[in-house]
Image (cartoon, rainbow, N blue to C red):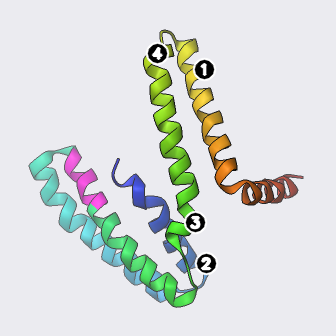
Amino acid sequence: SVGILVVGIANTFMNALWACRQLKIATKLMVLYAILNWATSVPLVYLFGFNGAMIGSVIVLFISLPLNTYYIKQITDVSIIKNIWPSFVAGLLAGMVTYGMSLVLINSLISLLVVLFLGGVVYLLLLYIFEGKKLINELKWIWGKVK
């Protein structure tokens, strides 16, 4: 679960390096991450079984994020916190609301689905409150591509 905090950012930055034709840097980083993954995961598998592989992958993720960020910042100015705080806070608050509703409302599969749906609605409402104009512009852009 800890790895999910950084995997989206680290992978997006790696994909951006490929997209910006930074092939030598991206290839070197991928080789480094593969070596680190084997170097950490194999011993951890012996210690913790299958969970060791996941722990090794998370270690590599937390090493890759600052490296990927460093190389992306050589190309363009990126502000991670500015771009993720609205969805992170909305997700955190919606998760808390959904958890609270689950304690009171869930007693069947239908009520579970209703609580999950309401949690999604709460998330979207909070995201609209935090980033309404940007959200509308992105939805318009997506709708324009779908047409």
Q: Name the residue under label 1.
A: 114
Drawn side of residue 138 relative to residue 46, left or right: right
Q: Disc 4 on helix, strand or loop?
A: helix
Q: Where 98 falls versus 147 (above or below)?
A: above
Find disc 4 in the rendering and name its residue: 104
* Residue 61 part of the magenta segment: no
Q: What residue type is labelled 1?
A: Val
Residue identified by numbered label 2: 19
C-alpha gap between disc 3 and disc 2: 20 Å
Instruction: From the viewer's side, name the closer residue of 122 and 62.
Output: 122
Seen from the viewer's position, the closer of residues 68 and 92 is 92
Where residue 65 sits in the image (x, y, percent)?
39, 71
Q: Which residue sits at x=46%, y=35%? A: 96
* Residue sticking out furthest to the top: 107
- Secondary-structure class at tag 1: helix
Q: How far apart are marks 1 and 3 (CA)?
A: 30 Å
15 over 8 or under it: above or below: below
Give the residue displayed 57% in from the left and 66% down from the top. 83
View extreme (front): residue = 129
User: Residue tagged by mark 3?
Assistant: 83
